[in-house]
Image (tube, grey):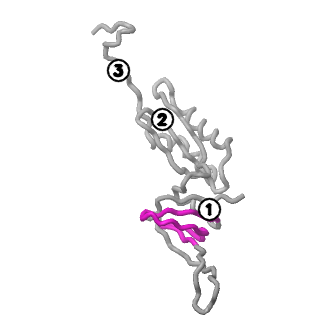
Amino acid sequence: MNVEPGDNKSPVLFLLSMISKEKVESLIADKLASGDYFIVSLDVSASNSIKLIIDSMQGISIDECVEFSRAIEHNLDRESEDFELEVSSPGLSTSLKVYQQYVKNIGRELNVLTTDNKKIKGLLISSNEQGIVLEEEQKTKIEGQKKKAIVKTRQNIAFDNIKKALVVIKF
């Protein structure tokens, strides 16, 4: 079949090499091991759009994001693997997604939305592989007293029951 340039009716075949999530993870493995970094999310689309959200227990700087970006970009060949790359840290308005983020935020106040749409606001007391413990303060009428008193209760919430968890930002 003869294909003439500019002929819009001719079949065009684009061969793009699909970049796998595992390949990206292997490219940053050394960088991850060099500190207390962890992946919050890593998405690779069919069109090779790579989106990496990275964090550490001390937070992550722009320079550290650049280092991760270079570790990926310098080890992929644009000639055979056309790709788009975005490396960032989780934003303040981003829901907590991985266990390490909960550990990092122990002692901070969270707004949690459960899978049954119950809203809980409380202090993150602890976190383990199964879930979190929140300490919630509520004004409750105590028998024999005229005024309501603040009562602290602790709730265990499994990760499977958390739809969204946001850190409360205080200025």
Magenta residues, start to end: 108-135
Amino acid type at circle 1 is Asn
Circle 2 Cα neighbour tier, 10 Å, few/some/many (<14 / 14–19 / ≥20): some
Q: Residue furthest right?
A: 171
Amino acid type at circle 2 is Ser
The residue at 51%/26% (across/down) is: 78
Measured from the top left, where is residue 158 in percent x and y? 46, 67
- For marks 1 and 3 on the same chain, the one whose residue lies earlier in the sequence: 3
Q: Residue furthest bottom?
A: 144
Q: Which residue is mark 2?
A: 49
Q: Which residue is mark 1?
A: 105
Q: Quadrant of the N terminus?
A: top left
Asked whether the viewer can see residue 146, the reply is yes
> Which of the two residues, 169 or 68, is positioned nearer the viewer here?
169
Q: Nearer the viewer, mark 1 or mark 3?
A: 1
Q: Which residue is mark 3?
A: 13
